[in-house]
Image (tube, helix red, strand yellow):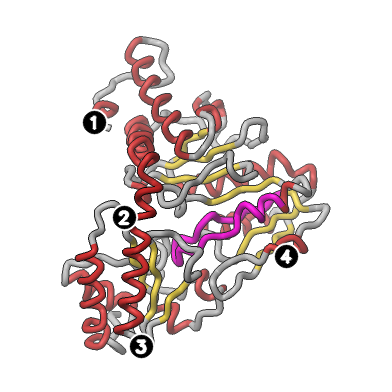
Amino acid sequence: MAEALGRLGNPSSPHAEGRAAARLRDAARACVAALAGARPEEVLFTSSGTEANAWALAGLAEAGAGKGKHLILSAVEHLSLIHMARRMEKAGWKVTCLPVDRFGRVDPEVFEKALTPETALVSVQWANAETGTLQPVGELARLAKARGVLVHCDAVAAAGQVPVSLGAVPVDALSLAAHPWGGPPGIGALVLRKGVRLAPWFVGGAQEEGRRAGTENLAGMVGMGRAAEVLLPEIPALAERITPLRDRLIRGILKDVPEAVLHGHPTERLPGHVSISIPGADAETLVLALDMQGVAVGIGSACTSLTRKASHVLKAMGVEESLALGAVTCSLGFRTSQDEVDRLVELLPRVAARWRGVSIQ
């Protein structure tokens, strides 16, 4: 990234400095494509996973609306998708928001019944960022493609923890972001299967094949590509190492705090994700109290943690509001150690007992 920041050339310029910058961009695109099981020309850079999600719905809908104007998505999708779906609804689209079970998973039979001759597009996430639950995305995508329906998949939370491949599942588009897997914030990608039509997002320039105009964020692209390059061969070993740590954390918390509630599927979940509530304990208070002890945990999704409203994901799963407001997320990664897991298991019961019923306004 430092090298890219030192480049004076615009990647779109034909002079030597521009060509050198373009080589860095193209190498980064190839690395991201490898992580996503795609070809370099199928990777379109964006500013974030949120932008990739919004572009996927709007761009696929505009380009493929001739089939019909019916969109299907689940009730636990990222708000960037849910809000874009609402905008499409105002523009005349019929939107079906599918329910999920108590683990946050879509029932394939319910999904199949929701498909109609007017269904043009479905969007289903690979994994949920708040609960860690994995969706049966391969099965859902096959059901949709059997009807000739375009499929978008939000893979932002999944990429980097589990293998994510455009070649392994019949989806037409994948959304990615760099920061969940060690890359810089402010850069993402929409991976679009070759031959799938997508309406331009920004116009006025030839960048990203004329679909997203504007001078490229070269340093961000390079950082995303380098993170993908480092991570790709490590994914199997990462999952093998952190899954036992995740399970140790869950067992320890539920043993020492029996009333604690685990959110998400017990086994079909990301290897490095734990979402939990302790009845009577306020999430913000827990987060700040643990932070004072040098332990960083999160509140639901980072994109919505400032709203202090019950998570739409947990509400869709049938979690009562008081528990939903108390949910904290624990993310494990490359550097997480067993000692750190055991420290949280030791600290959490004491912190919860001390601050239970106390909320910070």
Q: Mark 2 points at which residue?
A: 333
* Residue 295 counted in the magenta span: no
The 10 Å Cα crowd at callout 1, few under 14, some 14 to 19, many 20 or more, is: few
Q: Residue 2 carries which label?
A: 1
Whichever of callouts 1 and 4 sits on the residue coming sooner in the sequence is 1
Q: Which of 127 and 43 is in front in this view?
A: 127
Range covered by the magenta-colored residues: 121-142
Q: Is residue 229 above or below residue 240?
A: above
Residue for badge 3: 280
Residue 286 at what x, y percent from top left? 28, 77
Query: Which residue in the structure is indicated by mark 4?
Result: 109
User: Given contact means CB atoms under 8 Å apart, are the residues at marks 3 and 2 in contact?
Assistant: no
Mark 4 and mark 2 lie on one chain; the one further toward the N terminus is: 4
Numbered disc in front, either 4 or 3: 4
**Above or below for 127 versus 219:** below
**Residue type indicated by callout 4:** Glu
Q: Tell me which amino acid carries mark 2.
A: Gly
| Relative height, residue 52 to residue 250 (above, below) | above
Verify CB contact (< 8 Å) between mark 3 and mark 1: no
Q: What element carries label 3?
A: loop
Going 44% across and 35% down the picture, which residue do you hit? 32
Magenta span includes 128 = yes
Assess disc 2: are there few (<14), some (14-19) or many (≥20) residues with their C-alpha within 10 Å of its C-alpha.
many
Type of amino acid at the residue the image marks with label 1: Ala
- Quadrant housing residue 183: top left
Which element type, helix, strand or loop, lies under badge 4? helix
